[in-house]
Each structure stands twice: as C-alpha cells, then as structure tokens.
Amino acid sequence: MKVGFMGLGGMGAGMASNLAKAGYLTAVYNRTTEKAENLAKVLGVTVFAQPEALAAAVDVVFLCVSADGDVLEMVEATATTVKPGAVVVDMSTVSSDTAQQAAKLLAEKQVEFLDAPVSGGVEGAKNGTLAMMVGGNELTLNKIYPILQVMATRIMYMGPVGSGQATKAVNQIMCAGINEAVTEALAFARAQNLPMKKVIEIISSGAAGNWFLDKRGVTMTNGTFVPGFKLHLHHKDLKICQGMAKKIDFAMPLSDMTVAHYEKLMAQGFADEDISALYRLKSQPNR
C-alpha cells in the first residue's frame, strides 16, 4: 500500500520519517511547502503542493495537524480525490465530534476513517515508540496494523469512531495533573535549597517516579524549556477536554486550573515553550 503523510510538524516529521525508513511512505504534504520539500529530499519521497493531489496518489492518508478546523479542511480536500477503499488515519488531537464529522464525510466516498491520536512526545515520534489509541472499524485497523507498528509500540483499539479522541482526552487531562504536581514539587524542592539533581534522581526511583519527571525534571530546573510538547498546544487540547466535559456536565477543576495557569504563561510570551514551562509560574513568588 502506498502511504501519504499530511502535516510535518514536530510529531509529523518523526512519524513520516519512520514510515519512509520502513518503505511505506511515498508522498508528503505540508502547508509550509519548504518544510515538505526539505524532508522529501531527505526521505526520497514525492512532495505534493496540494492535499487533493496527494490523496489521489496513495492508498492510506495520514493526518497530523494542529486543530479541529485543520483536520476538517484536510479531510474535505482529501474527499474530493481519494480512491474508494482507501483509508484515512487522523493522528491529530481533536474532539470526538470532529472525528465523527470526518468519518461521515469520507464514508460518502466509500473511504474508511480511523481516529488514532498518539502520546509519547517528539521523542516517541522520532523513535517510533508512540502509544496510539484508535477509534473506528476494527477490521480497518487490522488491515493497516503493520504500517502503524512502524510508528507505535503500543496500539490499542478503543471502539467506534471518536473513541480514540476520547481516550486521548483522558491522556491530556492526566498530563495536566502530572505537570501541575511535578512542577510544584520541584519548585518546592528549590525553595527548600535542596540539590535538584539528587532530588530528581531519588524521586524518579520511587513511587512518585514518572515519565515527565524523568524526561523534563533536569531541563526545567536548569531553565530550559525546549519542546517537547508546546504549551499552547496542550492548552488547546485542554480546551477541547473542557468542551467535551461540559456536554456531559462533568467537573474538571484540576484541568481548569491548568488552563488558567497556561493562559498566564501564554500572556507572558511562553506559548511556544514546552509544557514544563509551568515550572516558571510555580517558582514565582506570590504566584
């Protein structure tokens, strides 16, 4: 099967590269054409100037873009030229409603759709070690499973279309809580004048150890906030979670607090930093 990839940001570029190394990728598209051209040269694949052209040339289309509107725009363009029997897989983080809208648009063209958001950060995308949560037709998932294994070490079928995005919402809510806890704890350790490297090392080996502390503890306490996962993107994801929660009258006070904290940091000019930049806020006196 010929594979095309749309959206070559920090996550997309890593996933596309792994698809190319495995011999699946034949085509790429990105709104910033120069980025697509540069990556295409490195990977030895074709770059298309329009999503419609890419969709017509492949059997499987992967999407990894920033927002709900972007996903629907790409799906609408894809639907004009995609082959009946093709598969479209969206690995963006959007709402369950958007996934269902995309599936409906493509079903009219006899095209299968999977919502398959991922977790694992830029490192996971680069190393092919992502966790992938999938909604849609399980037979379609099985059909392209070997392709997905190039990008993810853990692939879980979650249910009908929208289930993948609902599961990713769970992930993003949990990430908010972990970020709040780790940054606050490390800011407290700093205020206690403890040796930070030792704190991180010993805490990481005990019951409170976690991926975020292990991967971001040293960098945040050294004042380095290179993404990673951009703060404004997690803010966007949490706003999606808030919208989903509102529909079922579900309270999320911790996520609401994180949204407010992120908005303070965004107002200070830190929107493009890693989410560990929350440490900046936690370290401020009278925060």
Image: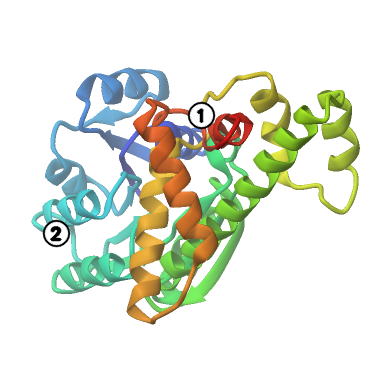
Query: Where does label 2 land, which residue?
Result: 79
* 162 to 213, vertically: above or below: below
Quadrant of res 41: top left
**Of the residues shown, which amino acid type is indicated by label 2?**
Ala
Quarter of the image where the C terminus is located:
top right
Residue at 20% across / 73% down in the picture?
104
Q: Is residue 92 visible?
A: no
In the displayed structure, does residue 29 sit left or right of residue 109?
right
Crowdedness of circle 2 by 10 Å Cα count: few (<14), some, many (20+)? many
Residue 171: horizontal and vertical position, in percent?
Answer: 55, 59
Cα gap from disc 2 to disc 1, whole angstroms:
33 Å
Residue at 28% across / 49% down in the picture?
67
Q: Indicate the secondary structure of the residue bearing disc 2.
A: helix
Q: Is residue 199 visible?
A: yes
| Cβ atoms under marks 2 and 1 closer than 8 Å | no
* 157 to 205, vertically: above or below: below
In the displayed structure, does residue 1 sit left or right of residue 78?
right
For marks 2 and 1, the one nearer the N-term is: 2
Toward the viewer: 68 or 16? 68
**Nearer mark to the viewer, of 2 and 1:** 1
Q: Indicate the secondary structure of the residue bearing disc 1.
A: loop
**Of the residues shown, which amino acid type is indicated by label 1?**
Pro
In the displayed structure, does residue 173 sit left or right of residue 57?
right
Query: Where does label 1 land, which residue?
Result: 227
Quadrant of res 65: top left
Residue at 30% across / 66% down in the picture?
99
Residue 111: horizontal and vertical position, in percent?
Answer: 23, 67
Residue 7: horizontal and vertical position, in percent?
Answer: 31, 39
In the displayed structure, does residue 235 sit left or right of residue 286?
left
